Image: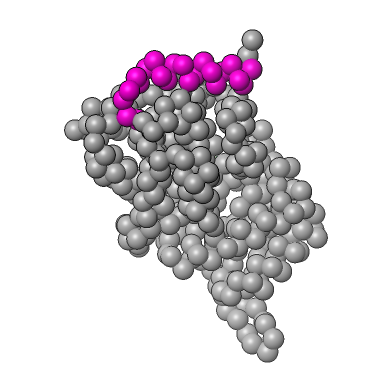
Amino acid sequence: LWTPANIVEDAIARVRATVGDDKVLLGLSGGVDSSVVAALLHRAIGEQLTCVFVDNGLLRLHEGDQVMEMFARNMGVKVIRVDAEDLFLDKLAGVADPEQKRKIIGNTFIEVFDTEATRLRDVNWLAQGTIYPDVIESAGGKTGKAHVIKSHHNVGGLPEDMAMSLVEPLRELFKDEVRRIGLELGLPYDMVYRHPFPGPGLGVRILGEVKREYAELLRRADAIFIEELHREDWYHKTSQAFAVFLPVRSVGVVGDGRRYEWVIALRAVETIDFMTARWAHLPYELLERVSNRIINEISGVSRVTYDVSSKPPATIEWE
Ligand code: XMP
């Protein structure tokens, strides 16, 4: 009988049999898949697990702290947090092309991860949050974005001088099963049912060149949007929602002053498979509140727009 409890029990037994007393390394992104692997491995092998969490400066507001709070503090998982914001932003300086930005972010991630992995001694296993749809996608030779990134973020290319084998405990599971297992393992509902976040993060939500100032502004605008969606019970009625930074200046008037500042676009979609999507018909009152809050609370933003494009032809992300 398939129940989350059975699956967990079975996966734990298999992991133990596979890795024995060896040490295991996991790249923890804060996304659902790697989080569930972390919780599962922690339960299976405890102290033998070490996670590496890379803060690339392109994460959502307080994301790094939340990951540390949940895994390191609450659960007692060994997590090495790497603050690599400067490194990523330096490498991205002057680069405007979306695909090039993706490559740089992916490669830099691998570089940072490798450095940490090499520092740790005697690690024989690399854990990955590969799930069944990822397996099918690579078998079919599709080069979907998700897979490309997955292979980046899951470090498809192992460091050459490190002999590590892969352990992929979610390999046979669909997303929904992974979520249920996450709940079974005690991860909070809000983390297990969080909207997907692309590997390159804010790097592809800041159009064109990425700058620290833009990232900071976007993080705050995004947090306001998400907070209001939760407040109005709309978060789980949308499949994905986020703010986008447009490197365009627009005029506004505040008090007696004329402002000439940046534009934020809001994007919210409903979708089953992320291949096609409808823009979410959010209530006007909600949009109004989000817009007012963003413009009033974030100096540097003078205008907010709502994206009413469906996929196709528009993609969900703006880059
Ligand atoms: P698009 O923009 O192609 O997005 O309609 C479909 C889904 O894929 C996510 N996405 C990415 N995920 N790396 C990822 O890990 C990427 O480079 C990437 N680009 C898009 C997007 O957030 C949406 O859920």
Figure quadrant of the N terminus = top right
Foreground pick, 57 / 192: 192
Q: Judge whether residue 63 can be spotted in this image.
A: yes
Foreground pick, 256 / 23: 23
In the image, residue 159 lies at what x, y percent? 25, 35
Foreground pick, 302 / 67: 67
Magenta part of the protein: which range? Answer: 3-24
Residue 219 occupies quadrant: bottom right
Q: Residue furthest left?
A: 161
Q: Please name the residue shown 41% across and 19% down the image.
A: 16
For residue 262, side relative to residue 256 (left or right): left
Vertical placement of residue 6 versus 115, above or below:
above
Asked which colour scheme the image uses, the reply is one colour
Q: Please name the residue shown 46% across and 55% down the image.
A: 58
> Does the magenta stretch mainly form a helix, a strand or a loop?
helix
Residue 98 belongs to magenta span? no
For residue 162, side relative to residue 228 (left or right): left
Vertical placement of residue 303 versus 67, above or below:
below
In the image, residue 12 lies at what x, y percent? 48, 20
In the image, residue 228 lies at what x, y percent? 71, 57
Foreground pick, 205 / 127: 127
Q: Residue furthest top?
A: 1
Number of numbered discs visible in the structure rendering: 0
Q: Judge whether residue 151 can be spotted in this image.
A: no
Vertical placement of residue 294 versus 55, above or below:
below
Residue 276 occupies quadrant: top right
Residue 11 belongs to magenta span? yes
Q: Please name the residue shown 41% across and 52% down the image.
A: 55
Q: Please name the residue shown 40% across and 40% down the image.
A: 78
In the image, residue 106 lies at what x, y percent? 37, 44
